[in-house]
Image (tube, helix red, strand yellow):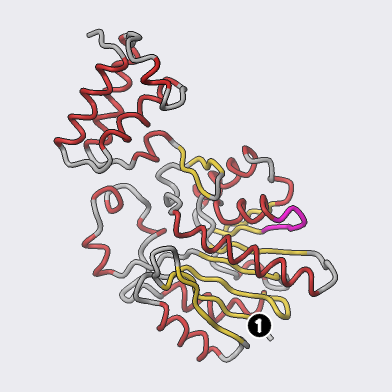
């Protein structure tokens, strides 16, 4: 079968729309532009160009994957975060825009700590690093920093290592396979950021197929109330935080108050507060050591 770029786009758009896929037109464009290695606007400039049989078959296969519910990011293998392009696959959670708040506030707190201590060595930690999006974004923005990323999933760490190499910060990143901060005893960090699993058991049952069927459950499920791992990190993080160091935790939309209570009950932090995301949701809880 021989179709032009324009014809293939139109047919794909209508199929996706009929199946109820959100942003059907944009999805059709992204899948074809990525396949042809061209910018999306050029698809319309080249609309009369014929696709080869192989290109058409590859595009059709990509469409079928999306129609089955596979996330667009896993099909293209890429996701933008903090204006950087990250490789993603089913070993890692797809980075979400709201997690950029962790980087934004983490950069601010790390800079404050560094400047107040006459530019002492700036060591940062990302617990549950996944694709490495938080650790790498911090390293990219703070060139004076040394960043550690830890994850219990070896497959995720391999993705993170590859992203660090692609984004040219590998020399300042250290990757460790382990459980929370357990392997890091004896080290001290100015900042610990973490986007640990926080989806509750009840919420998991309601997630769309794009998430439930494809993204790694271990990166999402946080137990009955969603706070199983977060509680453990709150209890253990003071051992690896430097004086005046900060803990930043991404939480679910109804969890901030409970997390603040856990931090206060821990009794080792001096200050605690909440940052809201662009939608006005309590998204990140922060705490500072004395």
- Determine crowd level at label 1: few under 14, some 14-19, many 20+ residues with C-alpha closer than 10 A: some
Q: Magenta stretch: give its range.
A: 142-147
| Residue wearing tag 1 | 289
Which residue sits furthest left? Answer: 18
The front one of 278 and 71 is 278
Q: Quadrant of residue 255?
A: bottom left
- Residue at the right extreme, as displayed: 118
Relative to 68, 147 lies left or right: right
Task: For the N terminus, give its image quadrant.
Answer: top left
- Tell me residue 166's x, y (percent): 62, 37
Q: Which residue sits at x=39%, y=59%?
A: 218
Secondary structure under the numbered disc 1 in the rendered image = loop
Residue 207 falls within the magenta-colored stretch: no
Residue 282: quarter of image: bottom left
Taking the image as shown, residue 266 lies to the left or right of residue 6, namely: right
Classify residue 240 as left or right of residue 132. right
Q: Position of residue 111 (x, y in %)?
A: 72, 66
Residue in front for this viewpoint, 140 or 42: 42
Q: Position of residue 157 (x, y in %)?
A: 55, 50
The answer to whether 87 is drawn above or below residue 10 in the figure is below
Q: Quadrant of the C terminus?
A: bottom right
């Amino acid at each position: 079968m021989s179709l032009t770029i324009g014809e293939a786009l139109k047919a794909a758009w209508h199929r996706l729309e009929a199946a109820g896929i959100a942003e059907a037109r944009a999805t059709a464009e992204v899948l074809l532009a990525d396949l042809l290695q061209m910018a999306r606007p050029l698809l319309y400039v080249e609309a009369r160009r014929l696709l080869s049989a192989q290109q058409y078959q590859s595009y059709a296969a990509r469409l079928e994957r999306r129609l089955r519910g596979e996330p667009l990011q896993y099909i293209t293998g890429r996701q933008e975060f903090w204006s950087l392009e990250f490789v993603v696959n089913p070993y890692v959670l797809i980075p979400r825009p709201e997690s950029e708040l962790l980087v934004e506030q983490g950069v601010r707190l790390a800079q404050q700590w560094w400047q107040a201590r006459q530019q002492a060595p700036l060591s940062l930690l990302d617990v549950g690093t996944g694709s490495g999006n938080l650790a790498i974004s911090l390293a990219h923005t703070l060139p004076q920093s040394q960043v550690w990323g830890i994850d219990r999933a070896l497959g995720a760490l391999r993705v993170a290592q590859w992203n660090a190499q692609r984004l040219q910060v590998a020399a300042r990143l250290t990757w460790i396979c382990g459980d929370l901060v357990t392997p890091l005893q004896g080290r001290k960090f100015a900042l610990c950021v973490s986007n640990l699993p926080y989806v509750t058991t009840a919420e998991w049952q309601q997630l769309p197929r794009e998430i439930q069927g494809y993204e790694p459950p271990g990166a999402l499920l946080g137990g009955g109330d969603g706070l199983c791992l977060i509680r453990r990190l709150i209890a253990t993080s003071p051992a690896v935080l430097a004086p005046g160091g900060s803990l930043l935790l991404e939480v679910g939309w109804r969890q901030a108050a409970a997390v603040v209570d856990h931090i206060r009950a821990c009794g080792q932090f001096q200050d605690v507060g909440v940052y809201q995301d662009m939608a006005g949701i309590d998204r990140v809880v922060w705490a500072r050591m004395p």
